Amino acid sequence: MKPELGVCYYPEHWPEAMWADDAAQMVETGLTWVRIGEFAWSRIEPQSGVLQFEWLDRAIETLGAAGLKVVLGTPTATPPRWMLDKHPDMLAADENGNPRKFGSRRHYCFSHQGYIDESTRIARILGERYGKNPHVVAWQIDNEYGCHDTTLSYSAAAQQAFRHWLAERYGTIETLNRAWGNVFWSMEYRNFSEIDLPDQTVTEPNPAHVLAFRRFSSDQVAAFNKAQVDTLRPLTDAPLLHNYMGRILDFDHFKVGADLDIATWDSYPIGFLSDRLEADDAHKTAFLQQGDPDMQAFHHDLYRAVGRGRWWVMEQQPGPVNWAPYNPAPLPGMVRLWSVEAVAHGAEVVSYFRWRQAPFAQEQMHAGLLTSNNHPAAALAEARQTADDLNSLGAVQQIQAKVAILFDYASDWAWTTQPQGAGFDYFRLVFSAYRALRRAGLSVDFVSAKDIPADYSVIFAPGLATMDPDLEQRLAERCDLAILGPRSGAITRDFQIPEKGRPGLSRIDCDVDLVETLPPTVERTVKGGGAARHWIDRLSGTAKDLLSFEDGTPALKAGDGIWYLAGFPDADLWDRVIAMAAEEAELTLRRMPQGLRLRETANHDFLINYNAGPVNWNGLTVEGCDVKILKRNPPELT
């Protein structure tokens, strides 16, 4: 299908007399999708049981009559004030037991059954009214699960639900005590009702307890989402989706995505550079008004996997945002670049946030395609240009990459629970591998532990906390070479060291004898170049040493189709490992200059230049903040 553009719109924010003109201008700009309703519960139901749909009926009709396809959101991310009078214990609580009070959004607890029932009720009402409406062509469930640190709740509802979850999982309290190692420090329980949430303990709580709570909390998000999905499925044939976020790892997106038709995410490149990315000052200065060259692509590829091939950008940054520490404006060309880059990675729709800047409330400093007084903002012309680009480009067919990264949300929960050293972070480790693969000119897929397609040349699984025999076998069957470590196969699902030791693999004779973590000023250099930082696995075993640290200890060991990496690589070491893997798997590498990235599809190669100035590569010049699209077989400029 040909990729399309959309926008997020809030008819309840504007006089009804503006709606038709807005819709006509959206169509003139080249937009075909419009998302509405995800924050409108107080206007849909101003009092419990008092429904006011006439305004929404007219908004949907106005937008649809103009030729726009509507994405209708369930408004459950913003329960209205009367909901608290009806369910005063529905609020989430922070780690100190303080309620997350009314006055912004996402103040509900995923475990509160009364609020779950209210959410399915409003979803059912909306589905019954609009499920067959020809203008409502997709549905968004809730909005940005996990935003504002709302996955983990320490409320009374969460405690009760957690105890029930543990009883179902472990069966008997004796089984739980053994699995958690509660003989340590006399932490044994006599029954499930004695188990509190892992907060406000004198020192760190049992890591098995914390990891179980994180697994439970993730399951609660998935169950909350599924409740609305199950409600809407019989009422509409339109696809159901959710808009995930960048670098939010505290629930399993694959599990949530399994119940949905399309994965979407909210892309804010400049905000993320300032707010969610570790990088030195020189890097952040060079890409201050463009965003990091790999951060958006990382999430594009991840959510393509979460959506099983179908994914959108639901919110694309069009100008300065309101929430990052610093909020510069994008350089000219960047809004178009971000949009085309998403399409290169398989986005079916790129939707800008938002149509018109709000003149009030928390997001009044967040730019839109129009200013609050209805003047064109800088991004409007770039959206129009992007629409023309996509019309000329046509369908973009994705192909399976040669390399993949196994991404595992539970590994992040484990290493957040017990990092063992400041600076060790699962996202940073995986992102460093992704960045290195892109520096080498490779396109990258993501896979989950449960879903690994066949025929990859190399699969990287850095920091994979738990490695069971079935997963090791799947990796052996579906790729020529698997590269694990550091800190892979280090714990069981209940946070114990495996009986066979770490990493406990059958296809490589390699043991982790001890672990050490290093301060940021210290590194362990590798013979021939590169170094490891943060985390070092001290290895033994008969597996071949491919690389060694300067002190002679193994840095990279090789077994039967599996390599184990003993530390958190710096950029030079990643480059060496990837070059060695490419030679082993007969992959062609194409070294990319800083800020220039290559994305391969079935019919096109996209050269994406995040630099402010032009870059020359392989005889081609790509202007600053620009995308050059090459047709394949034979290559020619389009």
Image (spheres, rainbow, N blue to C red):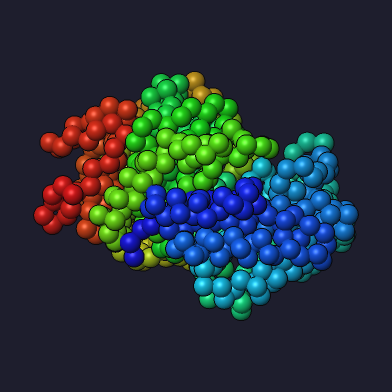
Look at 28% across and 27% down and name the residue there.
613
Drawn side of residue 121 relative to residue 298, left or right:
right
Look at 82% across and 56% down and name the residue there.
83
Q: Which quarter of the rendered picture does the N terminus lie within?
A: bottom left
Residue 4 appears anywhere in the view:
yes
Look at 56% across and 37% down and name the residue there.
372
Residue 347 point in image, percent of width and height: 39, 56
Residue 437 appears anywhere in the view:
no
Q: Nearer the viewer, residue 149 or 214?
A: 149
Number of residue marks = 0
Residue 241 against residue 550 in the figure, above or below = below
Drawn side of residue 571 relative to residue 160, left or right:
left
Residue 44 point in image, percent of width and height: 72, 60
Residue 581 point in image, percent of width and height: 28, 47
Residue 55 against residue 234 in the figure, above or below = above
Q: Nearer the viewer, residue 616 or 153?
A: 616
Q: Nearer the viewer, residue 629 or 278?
A: 629
Farthest-out residue, bottom: 234
In the picture, residue 56 is in which quadrant?
Answer: bottom right
In the picture, residue 475 is in which quadrant?
Answer: bottom left
Look at 24% across and 59% down and name the residue there.
602
Drawn side of residue 111 relative to residue 14, left or right:
right
Residue 589 point in image, percent of width and height: 22, 44
